[in-house]
Each structure stands twice: as C-alpha cells, then as structure tokens.
Image (cartoon, helix red, strand yellow):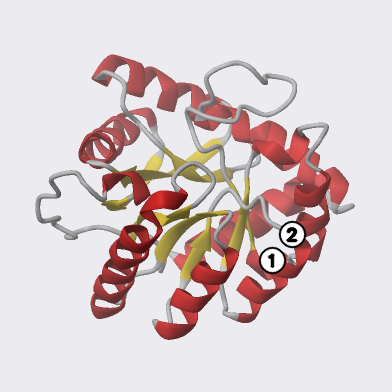
Amino acid sequence: MTELFDTHAHFEGSRAETAAMLLRAAQAGVARVMAVGGSESLNAGVELAAECGAAAGVKAWRCIGWDRDQIEAKRPPLDYTGVSAVGEIGLDYHYSPETRDKQVVLMGDQLEAARALGLPVVIHTRDADDDTLGLLREIPSKGIIHCFTGSPAFCRKLLDLGFMISISGIVTFRAADNVRESALVVPDDRILIETDTPFLAPVPLRGNANEPAFVVHTAKFLAELRKTRFEDFAAITTRNAMRILGGGK
C-alpha cells in the first residue's frame, strides 16, 4: 500500500475517538502524522495522539507551541523533549488584526526558542504576508508553512527563505484557484500535504469533520494537478516531511 504523511493534524477528542481516527488513518495508508499543538488542550492532544498512534501502527510526530489565539492565555512552560517541531505559531490578521503587535511578539519569541533548540517551526499565516516575511528574515528559521492559502508571489518568497509549503484540502475547493496556482509553483523537494484535522475536509468529503485518513483525497488531487503518479507524489511528500523533521523523534 502507498504510504502517506499527514503533516498537520490537531487532536482534541477522547482517547477512544483519537485511537479510532488513527486506526482509520492506518487503514487508508497514512503511516505518519504530525500531531500539532497551539494551545494547552491541543498540546495535550499531541501526546495522546502519539500514544494512540503507536497502538494503531501510525507514527505520530510531536509538534507543540502557542498559536496566535494564545496571546492573552496563561501559557505554562513547554517541555520540548522528544518534540520534532515548534508550532503551530504564526500570524492571522483576517480575524484578529487588532492584536497584530502581540501576535508578532509571540511568534518572534517562539522563532527564537526554536532556533535555540535547532527545531523547525510550523507556521500559520493569513493576511499577514509582510510581517511573516519580516520576522522570518529577522530570525532565520527552517520549517513548514502550513495550509498555504496565499498568492504564488508570496509562495515564491517563502520558498526563497527555504521553507516547505504544505497544501491542505482547500486545494480541492472550487474557488481555490490561487492555492492551485501556488501548488504548481512549489518544486518537488519542497511540497507537503496535510489535513489540518478537524478542519477543511477535502472534496468529496467537504462538510465533514476532517481526519488524517482524508489526506488521500488531497494527495490524489495534487498528483493529478502536478501530472505526477500518485505513488510517486506520496513518496515525494513523505520524503520531504522526513527531511524537514530530521527523520522524526
């Protein structure tokens, strides 16, 4: 069976729900998942996914951090032992432009922490192109731009900084021409796939709660878009994920 790597999934369900979801992932050929934090509950879900993944036969990479919605939250110190990436972190001015300055500070602090640890970062950016680029130039980093929804021009600038570009199920949406255009800009050695579970289920499952097993649909869509055999595209994206994560921990 062709093996896939879902590089971005959040887990906030019960142990039974998480275990069942990861078992379905394994059955669909999703052998690897990066469980991603961003809040206290999401960071806890990372550990649960790692435990449940082992039982299901899915390797779960750990990624913990504080996202842009945590600027006013109590943020206990994080233990990065065994973690493969810091995140998700980033900027979102679409919903919260009024907190711009605090978002920038929080992201910058975590970029510095990741650099000190030698870890890649997982970045969310929406309607914040200039500030995202400014921070990444000020604090040189490595990592993943997750769920990319920007323009091809923004994509090229991030590629110039050395980042991987991860494409979600949005690429299958009818109105997502810009995402499809950007997906064609990304070279083979920089492209990744993700679900952003539980959000953004791809066509033909749009409207459902997303889960790692559904990344198969995104991978098949992208393989066809890029005129690549599905099996080759799966191997390419898995290899890229393993490389940026240092082989996993």
Residue 192 placement: quadrant: bottom right
Residue 134, placed above or below residue 235: below
Tell me what residue is drawn at x 75 percent, y 49 percent.
Answer: 179
Disc 1 element: helix
Residue 81, placed above or below residue 177: below
The location of residue 233, given as percent across then percent down, is: 73, 52
Nearer to the camera, 174 or 30: 174
Residue 12 left/right relative to 203: left
The location of residue 220, given as percent across then percent down, is: 76, 38
Return the mark for residue 40.
none
Residue 88 left/right relative to 174: left
Question: Are there few (<14), some (14-19), or many (20+) residues within 10 Å of tag 1?
Answer: many
Nearer to the camera, 108 or 83: 108
Mark 2 — residue? 151
Residue 66, placed above or below residue 31: below
Say whether marks 1 and 2 touch (CB < 8 Å): yes
The location of residue 36, given as percent across then percent down, is: 37, 45
